[in-house]
Image (tube, coloured by chain):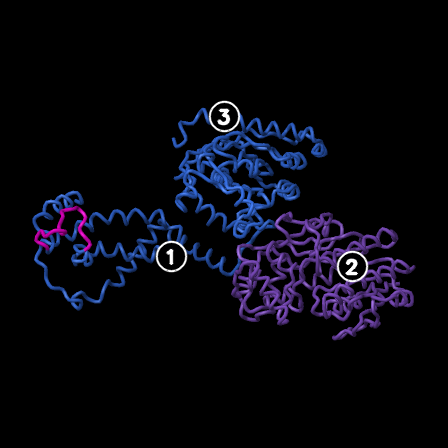
Chain colours: A blue, B purple
């Protein structure tokens, strides 16, 4: 039917343009009526199908907040062509003069209720009543402070309901993350995930956290540089998301507590390296992560991330401004800062995360963590594994955006 | 034969209450309270001796009363109550040195319990999530209460080295909170609108006032030597605490909070010291494993419960739902 309507509209628009008689600037015969034509159409507002769709969406949008965005978008888009076609059709019929008093008291309450229910079902699915109650309870708990944080400040509920939900569309739709080697993540007990670091902005860390949560159903507890905990906003978000400072005390405490800990030993050298050096691993810190794993006897899981290097190709740096602001670098990419906020949108590269075979450390004596030679050897082993996997993945992938 | 306990800093509320509680303990024979000004409340069976720990008279008190246990509680946190930073430092540091000197000379003293604080660990973005007893502050405190406590702890360690026969227990208590406590932190939470540092949400740990009294008594009677962190289990973030309190809070940039703190200090509304600003920016957590394994002490209140108790007293009736832990 929309096709027919559009065809009709196209033909008739030439013959009977609304109220113009074909004077210049009016009735151009476009499918979409002009704004004047849309204002003139009374029937569009009266018809029950068209009318209940619009006001019903509005309260639902308010209630659902950020979560509602994806499901809401489609129905509204579907309505548009119909509505656009309507006014031109109606224009053919001789119009009666309608006064506001003739229209009645407005939309009946029953319509409002069914529309609200329909919208709730649209947003929350069929068990919407329970889901809505859950959401309200969550909001109440947040307002009253009635939630738990662990010793590191990790707010599990906020992370699951908010951070993860916000990151999930980016991971699935934008970067289309592909995960390999999930079996290598132990289902329980302490383990240390060691990953390469890239991408100018540590998005790879966030994506790894989300991937581990969604696929391995565990929380990855990242270890962050001290700059993270110095910056306002970032520091409080990091702690709530489960991060803690990358120091030997915290690493050992988390690992011996049975947590899955993530570490990016390249640090700023890794994420801040120029685009020309992509996929070349930098020095792996001082191997502190290895001695933490040796001392606690947990396995080291090498993780290779391909795709993060291309999200913000770093072609330049502003060292003097960076020094002034006390940050390690200020990136210049082909789009930033030239395009302003638009330049902050990451390029939609295709990501592959491969978790490698765990490197076991429980065969060593915890005292051997003090043997620098052993620590260096294990560090090199981890580094080589990641580097080789990266090269293999690069050969394997079908182009950057594939 | 029971112990003879000398308590310093008895004019302050927490010292007086500890002395009273200790006097009621069957294993303690006598409690002697020492301070420069008489205590304000009822001290029960405690005998009060007016003496200044900053001069050698204290040695005579120790000898005359046959004191075998000394509880040092007179380290004060704010210059306001002492009448200026200079006096505060003198009271804290010189007072402690004199007391330790007297203890060293004494032939009767067998135990020394010092009430210290987790403030010695400082607060900085480079702190580990949890401090254990053998870690030090990441940055040495440059002024104020934290510096005093850091120095006093140094003298106490020196004393422990010189008198290995005396059992020295150092209690590093987390921020003490409770309905009756008046400290910079409780005064901060009593403000009508709580200022916060924009973009930071520090982790806080509390110790209930009853637990502080209990742990000190436990240290006196058990005589376990060592340094122990004492805090309620778990942490609260500042935003969470303010929400549980049901008070409005306003987030301001750090320099603005510091300005406001200085203004409030001048107006004598609240004592907002630089180290407190650091604490309210970066927070602090301490590890209490040793408190359980060696000191064998178990606090009755968790951090959240201690805070809930404080909330109840602060706004009676108003926080039916939010105050519970």
Query: Residue at 53% across / 70% down in the picture?
Result: B318
Q: What type of secondary structure mainly makes up the magenta span?
A: loop
* Residues at discs 3 and 1 in contact (Cβ within 8 Å): no
- Helix, strand or loop under label 1: helix
Q: Are marks 1 and 2 in contact (CB under 8 Å)?
A: no
Residue A391's label in the rendered image is 3
Residue A209 in sight in this render: no
Q: How far from the left and from the top, in percent, is residue A392?
A: 48, 24
Q: Is residue A352 magenta?
A: no
- Determine the secondary structure under disc 2: strand
Mark 2 Cα shell of 10 Å, populated few (<14), some (14-19), many (≥20)? many
Position of residue A293 measured from the top left corner of the image (x, y, whole percent):
64, 35
Same chain? Circles 3 and 2: no
The part of the image, by quadrant, that contains residue A40 is bottom left
- Nearest the camera: A95 or B96? B96
Task: Give the vertical position of B153 relative to A202 (above or below).
Answer: below
Instruction: Kindly identify which residue carries mark 2.
Output: B114
Left/right of residue A394 with respect to residue B242 in the rendered view: left
Q: Which residues are magenta?
A: A20-35
Give residue A63's mark: 1
Which numbered disc, 3 or 2, marks the residue closer to the eye? Answer: 3
Residue contact at pointers 3 and 2, CB within 8 angstroms? no
Q: CA distance from mark 3 to mark 1?
A: 48 Å
Mark 3 residue element: helix
């Amino acid at each position: 039917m929309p096709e027919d309507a559009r065809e009709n509209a196209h033909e008739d628009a030439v013959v009977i343009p609304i109220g113009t008689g074909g004077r210049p600037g009016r009735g151009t015969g476009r499918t979409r009526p002009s704004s004047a034509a849309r204002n003139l159409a009374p029937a569009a507002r009266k018809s029950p199908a068209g009318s209940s769709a619009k006001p019903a969406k509005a309260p639902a949008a308010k209630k659902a907040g950020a979560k509602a965005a994806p499901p809401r978008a489609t129905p509204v888009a579907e309505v548009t062509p119909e509505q656009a076609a309507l006014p031109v059709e109606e224009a053919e019929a001789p119009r009666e003069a309608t006064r506001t008093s003739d229209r009645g008291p407005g939309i009946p309450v029953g319509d409002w209720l069914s529309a609200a229910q329909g919208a709730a079902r649209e947003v929350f699915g069929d068990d919407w009543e329970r889901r809505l109650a859950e959401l309200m309870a969550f909001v109440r708990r947040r307002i009253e402070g009635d939630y738990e944080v662990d010793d590191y400040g990790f707010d599990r509920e906020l992370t699951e309901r908010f951070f993860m939900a916000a990151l999930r569309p980016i991971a699935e739709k934008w970067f289309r993350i592909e995960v390999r080697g999930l079996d290598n993540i132990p289902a329980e007990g302490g383990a240390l995930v060691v990953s390469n670091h890239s991408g100018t902005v540590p998005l790879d860390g966030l994506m790894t956290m989300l991937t581990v949560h969604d696929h391995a159903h565990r929380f990855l507890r990242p270890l962050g540089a001290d700059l993270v905990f110095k910056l306002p906003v970032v520091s409080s978000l990091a702690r709530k998301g489960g991060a803690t400072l990358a120091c030997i005390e915290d690493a050992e405490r988390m690992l011996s507590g049975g947590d899955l800990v993530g570490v990016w030993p390249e640090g700023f050298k890794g994420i801040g390296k120029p685009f020309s050096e992509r996929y070349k691993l930098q020095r792996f810190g001082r191997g502190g992560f290895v001695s933490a794993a040796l001392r606690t006897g947990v396995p080291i899981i090498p993780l290779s991330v391909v795709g993060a290097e291309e999200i913000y190709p770093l072609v330049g740096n502003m060292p003097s401004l960076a020094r002034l602001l006390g940050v390690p670098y200020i990136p210049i990419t082909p789009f930033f800062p030239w395009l302003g906020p638009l330049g902050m949108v990451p390029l939609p590269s295709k990501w592959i995360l491969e978790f490698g075979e765990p490197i076991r450390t429980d065969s060593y004596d915890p005292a051997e963590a003090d043997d620098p030679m052993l620590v260096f050897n294990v560090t090199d082993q981890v580094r080589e594994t990641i580097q080789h996997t990266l090269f293999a993945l690069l050969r394997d992938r079908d182009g950057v955006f594939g | 034969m029971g112990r003879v306990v000398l308590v310093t800093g008895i004019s302050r509320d927490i010292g007086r209450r500890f002395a009273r509680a200790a006097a009621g303990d069957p294993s303690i024979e006598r409690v002697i309270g020492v301070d420069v000004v008489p205590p304000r409340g009822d001290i029960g069976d405690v005998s009060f001796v007016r003496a200044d720990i900053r001069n050698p008279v204290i040695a005579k008190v120790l000898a005359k009363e046959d004191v075998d246990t000394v509880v040092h509680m007179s380290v004060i946190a704010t210059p306001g109550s002492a009448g200026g930073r200079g006096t505060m430092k003198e009271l804290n540091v010189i007072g402690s040195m004199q007391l330790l000197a007297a203890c060293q000379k004494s032939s009767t003293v067998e135990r020394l319990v010092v009430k210290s604080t987790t403030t010695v660990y400082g607060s900085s973005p480079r702190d580990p999530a949890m401090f254990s007893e053998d870690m030090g502050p990441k940055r040495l405190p440059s002024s104020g209460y934290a510096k005093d406590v850091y120095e006093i702890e140094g003298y106490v360690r020196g004393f422990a080295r010189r008198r290995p026969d005396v059992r020295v227990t150092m209690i590093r208590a987390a921020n003490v909170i409770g309905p009756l406590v008046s400290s910079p932190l409780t005064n901060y939470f009593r403000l009508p609108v709580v200022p916060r540092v924009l973009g930071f949400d520090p982790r806080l740990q509390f110790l209930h006032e009853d637990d502080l009294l209990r742990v000190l008594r436990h240290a006196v009677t058990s005589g376990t030597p060592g340094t122990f962190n004492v805090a309620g289990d778990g942490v609260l973030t500042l935003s969470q605490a303010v929400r549980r309190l049901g008070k409005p809070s306003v987030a301001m940039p750090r320099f603005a909070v510091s300005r406001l703190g200085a203004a409030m200090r001048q107006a004598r509304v609240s004592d907002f010291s630089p180290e407190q600003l650091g604490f309210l920016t970066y927070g602090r957590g301490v590890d209490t494993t040793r408190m359980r394994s060696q000191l064998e002490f178990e606090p009755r209140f968790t951090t959240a419960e201690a805070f809930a108790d404080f909330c109840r007293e602060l706004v009676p009736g108003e926080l039916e739902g939010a105050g519970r832990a």
